[in-house]
Image (cartoon, rainbow, N blue to C red):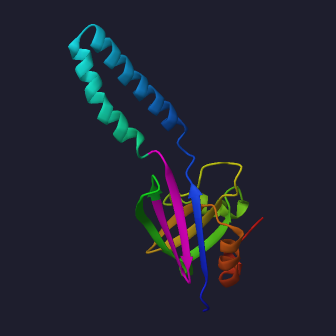
Amino acid sequence: MSESYAEVIVHDEKDPKGKQLGICLILVTLILLLYGAMFQTLFFTLGIIMIPVSFSTLKNRYREYEYLLVSDELDIAVVKNKSKRKKLASYSLSELQCMAPVRSHRLDSFHSNPQLKVHDYSSGNQEHTIYSMIFASQGMLQEIKVEPTEAMLKEVRMHYASVVFTE
């Protein structure tokens, strides 16, 4: 098999409530600090405690998924705040059963299996083309949702054309 390589980075947009949570935490912290400074030191102390809580909650809001396809291996990692990288999973394409767009009817037979585990590594934006990849490894079915580029699709299709569908 010839060497194939593709790398894709996708920004995670699945957390719309994260922005609302951040705004609420900042507002609560400011209200506690202002009220405590004017009236009671107990509220001021609570406001001081809320500063690191707010900061630690807000600092991990930005996430990107990185797909790295090298030869027969698909590695998936998450990058938090453009600084921390953590490998999430590694899949062998020889175990690929089906790859099709999320809404494809080719996936219906797999979705009827109650033991199917779903992992969503896509941006969550419905306007983007999201694909489902079904892997059967060690007697377990896994569905991973990804947003491949044309180059990545071409590489997978070149070696596994019988299980890759673009309909």
Q: Position of residue 108 (x, y in %)?
A: 66, 59
Look at the picture and state if 76 lies above or below 23. below
Quadrant of the rendered image containing residue 34: top left
**Residue drawn at (32%, 31%), measured in percent from left and top?**
51
Q: How many marks?
A: 0
Q: Would you place residue 10 above or below residue 34 in this image?
A: below
Q: Nearer the viewer, residue 146 or 105?
A: 146
Determine the residue positioned at 51% across, 65% down: 142
Q: Position of residue 141 (x, y in %)?
A: 51, 67
In the image, what residue occupies the spot 47% across and 64% down?
Answer: 77
**Visible residue check, residue 119:** no
- Asked whether residue 29 appears in the rendered view, the answer is yes
**Does the magenta portion include 69?**
yes
- Is 81 situated left or right of 99 in this image? left
Residue 46 on the magenta span: no
Residue 155 falls left or right of residue 40: right
For the residue pair 103 and 139, the one nearer the viewer reads as 103
Q: Is residue 164 above or below residue 1?
A: above
**Magenta-tinted stretch:** 61-78
Residue 67, percent across and down? Answer: 55, 67
Q: Looking at the rendering, which quadrant does residue 48 occupy?
A: top left
**Looking at the figure, which quarter contains the C terminus?**
bottom right
Q: Magenta region's main secondary structure?
A: strand
